[in-house]
Each structure stands twice: as structure tokens, then as C-alpha cells.
Amino acid sequence: MHIEITTKPNEADAKAISKGIVDFNNAKVPDLEPLEAEVKFFVFARNEHSEIVGGIRATCFWNTLHIELLWLSEECRGKGIGKQLMDKAEHFAKEQNCEKVFVETTSWQAKPFYEKVGYTHIATINDRPKGHASHYLTKDL
């Protein structure tokens, strides 16, 4: 047995472990949504000059909307724009047959915002990153 670590795997090697876990998952849960069914999407907020002033990057898979990131410029915060972005993302996710939402945020980011828009805190990892915490929240759609 040879164990190696690399930051630059060749494409075939990277695909081999992805295929391995997909095959394992499908053997355990035959009707599991395939990876090809993932829907990656963005929701943008633009100002009157069409400049992006906020947005969401997200993915729908396994009946779950995964909010990967949410950003709002300083001038947009506290004006309901974040909620509008979340509403659009959640509506789109429902159309993709998502039933749940999952998000990770850090202690200096948006935990109070997510709670305000109906998310439930389910876990915290302290000292991630060092001196801070990562919070995990969820919501049923």
C-alpha cells in the first residue's frame, strides 16, 4: 500500500474517488439524487447602474438548498435586500424540489440575520477559524 498526498491530482485520479463515493452512495440509497442533478445558481442584487451590490452563490442537491455564500455591500445592509435575496433563492430551490436549506456562517458574519429570516441554529464548531466559531443553521422550505 502506497499513500500519497497531492495538491494537483490528475483528472482521472480525482474522478476515481468521486466515482467511488457515488457508487457507494447509490448502492446504499438506490434512489439518491445523482450528482449530475446538482443545480448551481446565483442570485444578484444590482443597483441603478447595474453594478452588483450583493448576491448569493448556492447549490441545490439531495433535496437541500446549500447557501454557499451571501454578501451584501455596506450600503445595502439593513434595508431588507438580504431577505429579498434569500426569498428568491428559497423560491428557486422549491422549484428544484428542495425541502430544506443548510448554511454555514462564522461568528463575525450573519448568524443573527439567518435566525431573523427563520433559520434554526443546529451546531457550532468553536475555534474555527482560530479565535472565532463556525455556526450551522437550517430551515425547512
Image: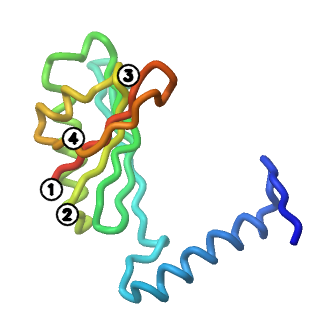
- The span from disc 4 to disc 2 (Cα, nearest Å) is 17 Å
Disc 3 residue type (three-letter): Glu
Give residue 97's quadrant in the image.
bottom left
Dot 1: within a 10 Å radius of its alpha carbon, few (fewer than 14), some, or many (20 or more) residues? Answer: some
Q: Position of residue 59 (x, y in %)?
A: 39, 54
Q: How is the image coloured?
A: rainbow
As drawn, the label of residue 36 is: none
Q: Is residue 5 left or right of residue 103?
A: right
Q: Residue furthest top?
A: 75
Q: Are marks 4 and 3 in contact (CB under 8 Å)?
A: no
Q: Are marks 4 and 1 in contact (CB under 8 Å)?
A: no
As drawn, the label of residue 140 is: 1
Residue pointed to by mark 4: 121
- The span from disc 4 to disc 1 (Cα, nearest Å) is 12 Å
Q: Choose the circle earlier in sequence order: 4 or 2.
A: 2
Disc 4 residue type (three-letter): His
Q: Choose the circle earlier in sequence order: 4 or 1.
A: 4
Q: Nearer the viewer, mark 4 or mark 3?
A: 4
Considering depth in this image, is 113 or 52 the residue closer to the camera? 113
